[in-house]
Structure formats: structure tokens, C-alpha cells
Amino acid sequence: MKPATGWQKRLDRWLEPFLDALGDKRRRVWAPLYILGLLLPGDRKSMQPISFRVAPKDVEQIQHFVSTSCWDPEPVEEVLCQKVDEMLGGESSFLIVDDTSLPKKGSKSVGVAHQYCGALGKQANCQCLVSLTLAKDDLPAPLALRLYLPQTWTKDLERCKRAKVPPEIVYRPKWKIALDEIDRVRAAGVRFGCVLADAGYGMCAEFRQGLTARSLAWAVGILSTQNMYPADVKVWMPAGGKRVGRPRVHPKVDAAPYSAERFIEQYGRFRQVTWREGTKGKLSGDFAIVRVRPADGDEAKDGVHLPGDPAWLVCERLENGDKKFSLVNLPASESDKQIVGALKARWACEQGHQQMKEELGLDHFEGRSWFGLHHHAVLTMIAFAFLQHLRLIENKSAA
């Protein structure tokens, strides 16, 4: 290894609390080397090329540290939460829920399955990681990357054993993984004002209700087919009839629900909304924003769901005529600019995923085990967070 440069010395200082969390003296040696290998130039950032670049005499030890050993990443993830919160946390920050896919050949890598692969835009063989990203002023930093394990895996105990999946891991849908990770980062002290997610999560009533139950503000994508009631819909419990017997227990609603698309056609009015200044001028678009109550309450006798809590139904009309639908539970007093601004902040997450793959090799890991994948993921997140730390310092110096 060449003598440490200025940024490498800064990296050594920045990593100190992470190394304290790792504890074991051998891990304190190999973790900084692996992170350095992720940060240094190189076309391939899987274990072997990294090892040859940073410690050619210790290839097996680094590979054992990442792929074979079963150290718990949770204490390191807690430090990551604290570091990211120091950089970006606050009421004006957004917590973005998404997932990112890692295309894979073969069937032995943990969690690999034929499923939708966002990286390829189609169904393909891949691993899928549920992600949490904290973003502020378009600057993202990752907080969580947790593998989604399909039921084809969780039902195959022998397959899970070969991939070293911990026995306590059971099937959880992506929205449940996301809620559990939100609980974890909040417990670690991460501060944010609003949760954002695309329709893959937002179309799930349990996910939205889980956020509401946690007293969180949210702005999420939904499907155009999801049903809505007018904001002033009336719900009441009818009086029991004169006949002897059990009283009626099913509430009545004075309006029928419409799909989000039909609701916008009937009640929406499109107008230009500018949500902020961009580098090339004002950022604006064509939006219809209507107060509604989603049909995600309890199920009535006829199978139709009752009205849920009030929210904003947002429809963006794109230049090509396509429409995108969202739900936002911000207060009724919120301005169009604030509503749309929250929805548009989600793009920072995609930027972060792309940079972790292109710059740091998030999708280059070639190991097959549960621990190996999550070790590589957390070390990649630490490397990316350090780059954001440097960018913030540079921005302050330039100001």
C-alpha cells in the first residue's frame, strides 16, 4: 500500500466509531481495507479484485471477513444511522423507502429468484434489497439495505441453511421489512419529516396504515385503480329494525367509491405547480390535487372497504399524456408546492442507488451467503456515506 493521502487519513478518523462497533481486532483491520477498496478506482469491486488492490497478501483473510464470518452488522448499522443523521437529519429531511435489484446468474446466491428487476426493467433472475435512504436538499445517504427473501426460499429450509440464512428469518413482504427498518432507524435516533415511497409500497394499505399508526407523515405512489371517496363522505351506523334479533352492525356510506383515475376525471382540475428552483430554472409540472378519503378502512358487508383517513390525491400529467397517481397524508392546510415538493424529493433515492452501484460496486458481490451479502451492503453504505461527508465539507468550503 502507498502512504495514505489526505482523504484516506480523513477516512481513518471517520471510521473510528464503526471500528469500535465491530469490536474484534481482526475486523478492525479488514473493514477499513475493504472500504478503501470500494472507494479506490477499479472496474470490478467484488471481493477478490478489492483484496488484490488493497492487501494482495491477505486475500483469504479479507474474503473470510466479508463472506464467511457471521459478525452481526446491527451495531455498525446503528453507527451509520448516527453518522447520517448528523449530516442530513431534521424535520426538513425525507426518509425514502424503495428497493434495488441485483441481477444474478444461477440460483445459489441467497434470495435470488425470478422476479421484477428494476435494474433491467423486466422480470429476471435477481436479488432484491429493501432500502431506506435519508435525503435533504437532494443529497441522499443510505441507512438500510435488507434482503427480501421470497417464499420459494423461506419454504426451502435446506436451501436457506446452505446460504447461512439465520433460522429466525421468516417470510416478510417488502412493506413489512420496510416498516421494521423504519422502526430500527427511528430507535437509532434518525430524524426526518416525511416518508416517501413509490407505488410498489404505496399501493399497500397496510403499509400506509402502518406509517399513520406511527404518527408519520407520508407521500406515496399508488395505482390508478385504487378506490377513493370524497373528503366529505358520510359514514353512519343505521338503527336496528323492529324485528327481534341481532342489531345491524355494518355501517352505511352515502357515496360510492371511484377509482383514483375516475375521481380525478370527475373532480380534478389540472394546474401548473412550481415546487422549487432547479439548476436550470424553475421546476414545475401539471398537477391535479384533490382532498379524498381512500377506500382502505374496514371491509363492509358487501365487500367494499369503508373510507379511511383523509389524504391528498395527486395526479401528475406528464408531457406525453401519461398520468402518475399519489396519496399524501399531509394536513389539509398544506400548499400545493409543499405537497408536490415532497413527492418530487423521492428521486434522490434512485440517484443514491445508481451511485452505489456505479462508483462502489454494490451489485458486484459474488458471494452466496446471507451474512456475506449484508456485510458487503453495509460496508458499501458506509463508503457512500463517507463520500457524502466529503461532499458536504466541500460544499461548506465553497460557500
Image (tube, helix red, strand yellow):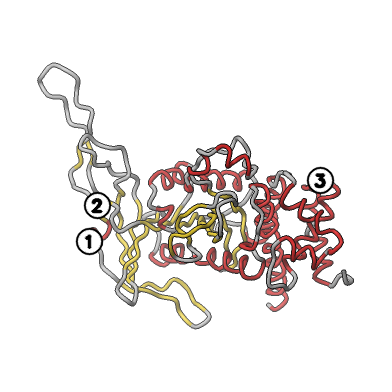
The reply to whether callout 3 and callout 2 are in contact (CB within 8 Å) is: no
SS at mark 1?
helix
Disc 3 versus disc 1: distance between alpha carbons?
60 Å
* Marks 3, 1: nearer the viewer: 3
Horizontal and vertical percent position of residue 20: 81, 49
Instruction: Residue at 28%, 70% (x, y): give it.
Output: 270
SS at mark 3?
loop
Disc 1 versus disc 2: distance between alpha carbons?
9 Å
Say whether disc 3 or disc 2 marks the residue closer to the N-terminus.
Answer: 3
**Mark 2 neighbour density, 10 Å: few (under 14) some (14–19) many (20 or more):** many
Q: Which residue is mark 3?
A: 23
SS at mark 2?
strand
Q: Which residue is mark 1?
A: 267
Residue 362 in sight in this render:
yes
Instruction: Residue at 19%, 47% (x, y): give it.
Output: 256
Is 398 in front, or is 24? 24
In the displayed orientation, state which residue is furthest to the front: 106
Q: Quadrant of residue 390?
A: bottom right
Instruction: Residue at 55%, 68% (x, y): give it.
Output: 351
Horizontal and vertical percent position of residue 309: 35, 46
